[in-house]
Image (spheres, coloured by chain):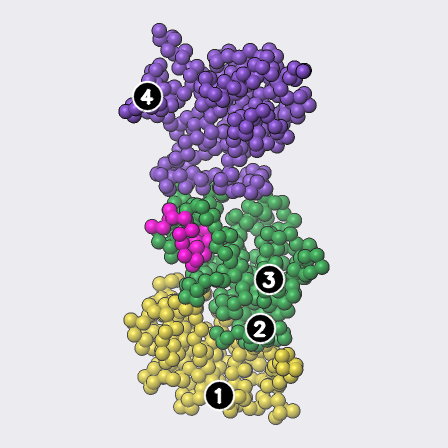
Chain colours: A purple, B yellow, C green
Amino acid sequence: MQEYNFAYLDEQTKRMIRRAILKGLAIPGYQVPFASREMPMPYGWGTGGVQVSAAVLTPDDTMKVIDQGADDTTNAVSIRKFFERTAGVATTTVTGEATVIQTRHRIPEEPLKEGQILVYQVPIPEPMRFLEPRETETRKMHALEEYGLMHVKLYEDISRHGHIATAYAYPVKVEGRYVMDPSPIPKFDNPKLEMAAIQLFGAGREQRIYALPPHTKAVSLDFEDHPFEASKADHPCGLCGAQDSYLDEVIVDDEGGRLFVCSDTDYCTHRQEAAR
Amino acid sequence: MTGVEPMIALSDVSKTFTLHNQGGAVIEVMRNASLSVAKGECVALVGASGAGKSTLMRMVYGNYLAAKGKVVVAGLDVAQAAPREILALRREVMGYVSQFLRVVPRVPTLEVVAEPLLAVGEDREAALARARDLLTRLNIPQTLWSLSPTTFSGGEQQRVNIARGFAHPYPVLLLDEPTASLDAANREVVLTLIEEAKDRGAAIMGIFHDEAARDRVCDRVVDVTGFAPLQAA
Amino acid sequence: MTPLLSVRALTKRYGPHIGCADVSFDLWPGEVMGIVGESGSGKSTLLNCMAGHLVCDSGQVIFDTRADGPTDTLTMSEPARRMLSRTDWAFVHQHARDGLRMGVSAGGNVGERLMAVGARNYGDIRDTAIDWLGRVEISETRIDDRPTTFSGGMQQRLQIARNLVTGPRLVFMDEPTGGLDVSVQARLLDLLRGLVRDMGLSAIIVTHDLAVVRLLADRLMVMKDGHVVEAGLTDQVLDDPQHAYTQLLVSSVLQV
């Protein structure tokens, strides 16, 4: 039996995906349709992100995979193993050492640098999907910049909760043009979308790829009198004491004892080591 | 005829009705009708019931289409004019007090009366003040002003209709039995309103079955029997 | 004065069938025109062609735009036409659910057009929504309720508020009182008439209800088999109909 082609996908498929990526980079925030392939994992497990990663990986890359900030969850471990086996690339859990980082629902706390690529797994790429179910109509709305509906969603939030309650997948306007779903990252991460690394978004089931080139403006939508706030739990990390990182709430015993810890495991580990 | 242009001038007006759904029967009801009404003049149309008094008034108002001839009101030939010209004429120049009140249900009486003034851009307070004044003069109890006239008695509706017709000082007024179904006191109010309108120079054409009223306010009488097709033939 | 809307030889076919044929008219600022005819007469087709919801085969729909004066909306770019339909036009559907977002609160429904044209102050949007709910006689306390909890008449009034909030100059209405109880209809008619007068709106109302046009419309167009068979002042067309079909139509209804 033959070895897998480098990074599982055949070269023609990777070429097709790269073309979609290049188009996405050329039109920041625009959803480029692509011919998503069947991958050896279920939809919802990151088939879009995996295809994008496969298309951009080179043998010299070092890869990191995180799920909700953690390197050690099932999803992260299995995707990392997948690329170790099919591409033979080096892997790491250290954010600063990775050249390609595939992520689900988080942006690492450590600022990314030029030369790095952040690949997002995206479940639903269309930010207006739940307000306007017709794809023909949402495409037209993007084309004509008819984005009033996005604010209706935020209006509904405020009228119901007194503030904008959307806490993740918070829509952004890219370079004053396309409104984009940043994938279900917490809105705490939204300001980090303007970064030095390349950001690629892959939605496998929905067959869409979109991208943010380095230092692209991504403004979170809001109202003048209800400005956007990148909020997080009002606690320090229970393990490393960080005040500035996004926290997960963990139940630690049967009495309902709770602990707030960094969701970015690499960040937390480094801080703990440095403290020791 | 004096050198002054009459406000209403009909010349050689004919009217036919074509009943397409009754074998296309053509009924000629009026032929070669000519008459004029000057400023400050009140002309009564007389003739037996069915002689064409109402038909003639309706043609002047633009409600019926004349088959032939000219119907010139304040310089506009209603028989040929575009709808918007007639609408403007009705809004600014020509008022019509019919025997029947036709209004949107639920609109308060005060608004119904003030509406012709609001339609010509009159200030709202001034329009309502004028409406109150007229309703008071016509003895409509103040308790009814905020109610829709659709629920009123026939006499009350008639008085609301008159108040509405006299709210705006139209230069031309068409009156269809303005004193019918009114008691003596209200009849007197209406006749006074007509006299006031004449004094400010309105040209009035009307149908009055009430002979005493006719004799008091009308300067001339035109018998429309003379416009019947058979006699004209 | 320039007509607000000039329709010229508008024609729409469905295969061999005529939707509407060779329709021409001018609508002037502040005028309300009714279009009547039986089902299948082409009145709704005509309305949808004018509003840009249907692509017509030939003709012109010239609207007096604020920026560029009279412009044929059928040859306008789609972004420009959609912008026009958000700012200067309104469309009131027969079924409120076609014109409302049923999953969005009353306030959000009214606010959408404001946000679509750039309003970004929540407090202002909400104040405007409250003002408009009041104008269409919906209690302020219902602002955060979804239209699914409203009666038919309330839904229709909400649809009107949602459409008129950006101060359009032309309103298309498709059977606006259809399917409502008579007493609810009366309330809606009264409301529409007041709004038309106070805002100086022009409107085109498609209906099969002659009582509605008598009370609301200045002018009337009668359609049959896709053609306009008679047009004129509303009361003249209803009281002295000239065409055989109009005579039939008028004599077929109970006296109003």
Quadrant assignment for the C terminus of chain A: top left
Residue identified by numbered label 3: C43
Real-space Cα separation, disc 1 to disc 2, in angstroms: 40 Å
Real-space Cα separation, disc 1 to disc 3, in angstroms: 49 Å
Q: Do the residues labelled 3 and 4 touch (CB within 8 Å)?
A: no
Marks 4, 2 in one chain? no
Per the rendered image, the range of residues in magenta is C141-165
Please state the horizontal and vertical placement of residue B18, each as a whole percent of the image: 63, 80
Residue A82 in view here:
yes
Helix, strand or loop for disc 1: strand
Residue identified by numbered label 2: C249
Residue B72 falls left or right of residue A69: right
Rendered residue at 58%/24% (across/down): A40
Residue A15 in view here:
no
- Tally of marks: 4
Amino acid type shown at disc 1:
Arg
Please state the horizontal and vertical placement of residue C11, each as a whole percent of the image: 67, 58
Residue identified by numbered label 1: B220
Q: Which of marks 1 and 2 is in front?
A: 2
Say which of C148 and C99 sits in front. Answer: C148
Real-space Cα separation, disc 4 to disc 2, in angstroms: 79 Å
Real-space Cα separation, disc 3 to disc 4, in angstroms: 69 Å
Amino acid type shown at disc 4:
Val
Residue identified by numbered label 4: A252
Q: Do the residues labelled 4 and 2 touch (CB within 8 Å)?
A: no
Q: Which residue lies furthest to the bottom in this view?
A: B231
Look at the magenta stretch and give its main secondary structure: helix
Marks 4, 1 in one chain? no
